[in-house]
Image: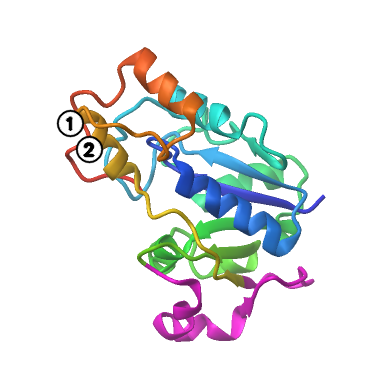
Amino acid sequence: MRRGLFGGTFDPVHIGHLDVARAARRALNLDEVMLVPSNIPPHRSTPHASAAHRFAMAALAVQGEDGLVVSDVEMLAPGPSYTSATLDRLAARGIDTRTLVFVTGADAFREIATWKGYPHILDRCHFVVVSRSSSEAPALRTLLPILSERMIDAPSQLTDQPRIFLVNAPTAPISSTDVRRRIAQGASVVGLVPAAVAGHIVRHGLYIATGLEQGAS
């Protein structure tokens, strides 16, 4: 099975996240992409919603979506949810991580040198990097010249050796920070998050008193 892993805080998950997952799946013909909500995000401040709520919203977001699922692999893990640790846990389950594709936005991948386990993490799995409104994937060749030889334009076929696939596809210019801010201000988030996610936020009163602070996108 050709499987993608899309990790994130998802505080909350929004349409832009789903656009990234769909674009990655199409570009590499993946059988499925797993959204992997982090328990404790390593590079962010404390999430505004609990891990349980963020997992529930991710599950609601992919409900009925062909090829998109949610994974709890990071939910019960102690300590920060480092990608390298997640790969360790999957390897312990007998999964060859070199067959996995780690999905991320181009804005996040720009900071890959700060990720725990860099640069060895790039040899442990494929990466597929999707354009976001603030950062186009092809620009990474210039921004990260030391990694340019590893980069391949997608759509493409997976190779035997881990590579960095660049997907220049349109994704909704939405951030979780903006969604939280709108909720805190009493504004509508219709079209920004899936309807089921919006319902969960309303039912549980999430982000009412927060959202004006910086946070995960």
Question: What residue occupies the far right of the structure in this picture?
Answer: 1
Spot occupied by residue 16 in the image (x, y as percentages of width and height): 46, 49
Residue 153 location, quadrant:
bottom right
Q: Name the side, left or right, on which 206 lies relative to 132.
A: left
Question: What residue occupies the far top of the structure in this picture?
Answer: 203
Residue drawn at 34 percent across, 50 percent down: 43
Q: Name the side, left or right, on which 20 lies relative to 134.
A: right
Image: magenta residue range: 135-164
Spot occupied by residue 34 in the image (x, y as percentages of width and height): 64, 42
The mark found on residue 181 in the picture is 2
User: Marks 2 and 1: CB-CB under 8 Å?
Assistant: yes
Residue 100, can we see it? yes
Q: Residues within 10 Å of mark 2 (few under 14, many from 20)?
A: many
SS for callout 2? helix
Q: Is residue 202 above or below residue 3?
A: above
Measure the C-alpha gap from mark 2 to mark 1: 6 Å
Question: Per the image, is 149 magenta?
Answer: yes
Residue 121, can we see it? no
In this view of the protein, which residue sits in the foreground, 216 or 187?
Answer: 187
Spot occupied by residue 82 in the image (x, y as percentages of width and height): 47, 48
In this view of the protein, which residue sits in the foreground, 8 or 177?
Answer: 177
Amino acid bearing label 1: Gln
Amino acid bearing label 2: Arg
Q: Residues within 10 Å of mark 1 (few under 14, many from 20)?
A: some
